[in-house]
Image (cartoon, rainbow, N blue to C red):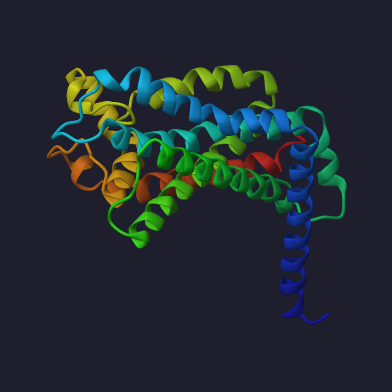
């Protein structure tokens, strides 16, 4: 086999193995749809709780419909919550020795992680579609055209990609499915210490600064801007450069945790 042909063969091999392992994850979901349905419907419950039970007491800075302010924040939270599913799946395979068995097979090693990442990304797209549909039912809509709306969806997918990388790294590092409880404890404060539900200006000074620089706040604020929904405004750097930060934060997470995940993957048997 000629040298130029070998990289192409390896690429096709990796793609085929990735598709196979993606199919494995999808087959698991088809046999056990319960957890998948719960994961899809839980954000809808949050819409009903915060939009209707608590929304009447919420005021949007500068005026506007609170549900239109809320939905982009919930879209962002949905992308964050997926980190738990990624962590659990990868940690379970590692703890049960499935990952080690995959590593002994004549297959592309990258496909084990890539297959899980593709499957989780497909699940996230479905969850986002459910949330967009739910938002439309409660009166949310975008106002600045399809191109900007697609750009906002792209930022949400970019954040989810970063969360997949984070979930894979943490799972390979800890290799304990039971540790997902600790991850859940961290996810909720990270979600609430953002602008997903209220403007950072309404928080105490130090907490407002933390919320303003939260990566979730960047994505939520950028989505509000691109959808044309009410935002929290302000003259701070995060408020004025939300779109740029919504791109920079996920890329930074991938740049830092991606190589660490690869290194950890290479040392699983040590």
Residue 247: percent from the left, percent from the top? 37, 51
Residue 134: percent from the left, percent from the top? 46, 38
**Relative side of 234 to 86, left or right:** left
Residue 226: percent from the left, percent from the top? 30, 52
**Relative side of 35 to 48, left or right:** right
Q: Quadrant of the C terminus?
A: top right
Whether residue 170 appears in this view of the structure is no
**Relative side of 54 to 122, left or right:** left
Foreground residue among 203 and 75: 75
Residue drawn 43% across the image and 25% down it = 48
Residue drawn 50% across the image and 43% down it = 128
Foreground residue among 20 and 153: 153
Residue 62: percent from the left, percent from the top? 13, 35
Residue drawn 56% across the image and 35% down it = 82
Foreground residue among 265 and 145: 145
Whether residue 111 appears in this view of the structure is yes
**Relative side of 36 to 150, left or right:** right
Query: Does 217 appear above or below 157?
Result: above
Foreground residue among 183 and 144: 144
Query: Does 81 appear above or below 178?
Result: below
Choose top left, top right, bottom left or bottom right for residue 24.
top right
Residue drawn 41% across the image and 33% down it = 74
Q: Quadrant of the N terminus?
A: bottom right
């Amino acid at each position: 086999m000629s040298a130029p042909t070998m990289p192409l063969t390896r690429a096709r091999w990796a793609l085929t193995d990735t598709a196979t392992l993606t199919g494995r994850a999808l087959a698991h979901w088809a046999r056990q749809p319960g957890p998948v349905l719960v994961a899809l419907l839980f954000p809808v419950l949050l819409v009903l709780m915060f939009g209707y039970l608590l929304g009447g007491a919420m005021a949007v800075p500068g005026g506007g419909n609170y549900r239109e302010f809320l939905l982009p924040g919930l879209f962002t939270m949905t992308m964050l919550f997926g980190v738990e599913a990624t962590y659990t799946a990868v940690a379970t395979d590692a703890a049960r020795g499935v990952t080690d068995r995959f590593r002994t097979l004549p297959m592309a090693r990258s496909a084990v992680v890539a297959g899980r990442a593709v499957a989780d990304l497909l699940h996230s797209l479905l969850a986002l579609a459910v949330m967009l549909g739910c938002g439309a039912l409660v009166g949310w809509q975008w106002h600045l055209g399809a191109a900007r709306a697609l750009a906002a969806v792209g930022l949400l997918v970019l954040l989810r990609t970063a969360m997949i990388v984070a979930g894979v790294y943490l799972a390979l590092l800890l290799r304990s499915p039971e540790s997902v409880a600790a991850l859940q404890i961290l996810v909720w404060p990270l979600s609430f210490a953002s602008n997903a539900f209220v403007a950072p200006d309404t928080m105490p000074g130090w907490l407002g600064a933390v919320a303003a620089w939260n990566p979730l706040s960047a994505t939520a604020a950028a989505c509000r801007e691109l959808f044309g929904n009410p935002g929290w405004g302000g003259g701070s750097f995060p408020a004025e450069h939300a779109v740029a930060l919504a791109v920079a934060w996920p890329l930074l997470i991938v740049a830092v945790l991606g190589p660490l995940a690869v290194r950890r993957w290479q040392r699983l048997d040590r």
